[in-house]
Image: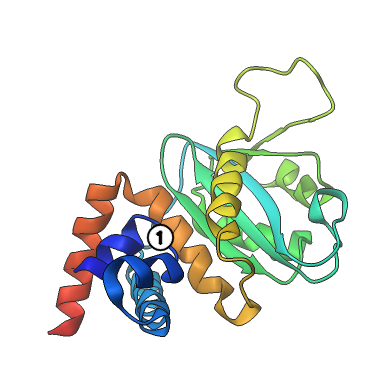
């Protein structure tokens, strides 16, 4: 279970190979197996109450305004229930016709949905949701009118993924779901207990 413990601790395959004494490729393969396992085990749930919505962009070689339109980047959409869980999805673009169906699927009707002022969220104004729009250019905003929760998740995710020095697009989904699992799963002890249970069940 040493490899599993190192994974939960957030170690890279390289560091794990040195500490545990296995080949780097062995650690890399095992870690990807764990990511695929957890992605298949993540529960489906609805978000309700106060929900924050935002897109973010990962990778790429050239920065754009908040990543929008930057070359080579992977677009990701996220929803976060305040005080609760986060849901993420890789999306082809940040258009209304892409983002709105995800919100309608994951958030319960009558939820309060907080977004920034990006035009793709305009459709929420005439939806079954209560739309609260945040203007980041305003210095003094209503204390509750923010999307700090989902932005904090993006920051945590990028900080975790940065240690891998680039992730190819084919594998990115599994790394993203790993970050979702880490955020939703609680402390390291809880994560280890859950992942160990999934792993042992899969082995048998």
Circle 1 is placed at which residue position?
11
Quarter that holds the C terminus: bottom left
Q: Which residue is at the front of the view, 154 or 40?
A: 154
Task: Identify the residue at horizontal 45%, vertical 65% (top origin).
Answer: 12
Q: Which residue is at the front of the view, 69 or 112?
A: 69
Task: Give how far across and how far down residue 30 sits, in percent.
Answer: 34, 79
Q: Residue furthest left?
A: 204
Q: Secondary structure at mark 1?
A: loop
Q: Report whether 140 appears left or right of 19.
A: right
Task: Give how far across and how far down residue 19 sits, in percent.
Answer: 32, 65
Q: Report whether 8 appears left or right of 178.
A: left
Task: Give how far across and how far down residue 50 sits, in percent.
Answer: 52, 35
Task: Identify the residue at horizontal 31%, vertical 62% (top origin).
Answer: 6
Mark 1 Cα shell of 10 Å, populated few (<14), some (14-19), many (≥20): some
Determine if residue 182 is in view.
Answer: yes
Q: How many marks can you see?
A: 1
Determine if residue 128 is in view.
Answer: no
Task: Identify the residue at horizontal 50%, vertical 55% (top origin).
Answer: 87
Quadrant in the rendering for residue 126: top right
On screen, 162 above or below 31?
above
On screen, 169 above or below 125?
below
Quarter that holds the N terminus: bottom left
Task: Identify the residue at horizontal 63%, vertical 46% (top origin).
Answer: 53
Q: Report whether 98 appears left or right of 111.
A: right
Q: Report whether 185 appears left or right of 68.
A: left
Quadrant in the rendering for residue 103: bottom right
Quadrant in the rendering for residue 20: bottom left
């Amino acid at each position: 279970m040493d490899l599993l413990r190192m994974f939960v601790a957030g170690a890279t395959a390289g560091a794990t190979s040195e500490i545990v004494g296995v080949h780097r490729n062995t650690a890399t393969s095992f870690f990807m197996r764990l990511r695929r396992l957890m992605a298949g085990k993540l529960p489906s749930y609805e978000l309700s109450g106060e929900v924050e919505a935002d897109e973010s962009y990962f990778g790429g070689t050239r920065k754009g305004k908040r990543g929008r339109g930057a070359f080579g980047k992977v677009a990701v959409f996220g929803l976060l229930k305040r005080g609760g869980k986060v849901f993420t999805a890789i999306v082809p673009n940040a258009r209304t016709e892409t983002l709105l169906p995800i919100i309608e699927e994951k958030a319960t009707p009558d939820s309060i949905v907080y977004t920034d002022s990006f035009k793709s969220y305009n459709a929420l104004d005439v939806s079954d949701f209560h739309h609260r729009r945040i203007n980041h250019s305003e210095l003094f905003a209503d204390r509750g009118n923010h999307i700090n929760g989902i932005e904090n998740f993006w920051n945590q995710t990028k900080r975790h993924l940065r240690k891998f020095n680039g992730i190819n697009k084919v594998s990115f989904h599994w790394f993203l779901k790993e970050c979702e699992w880490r955020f939703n799963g609680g402390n390291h002890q809880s994560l280890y207990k859950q992942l160990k249970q999934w792993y042992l069940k899969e082995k048998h």
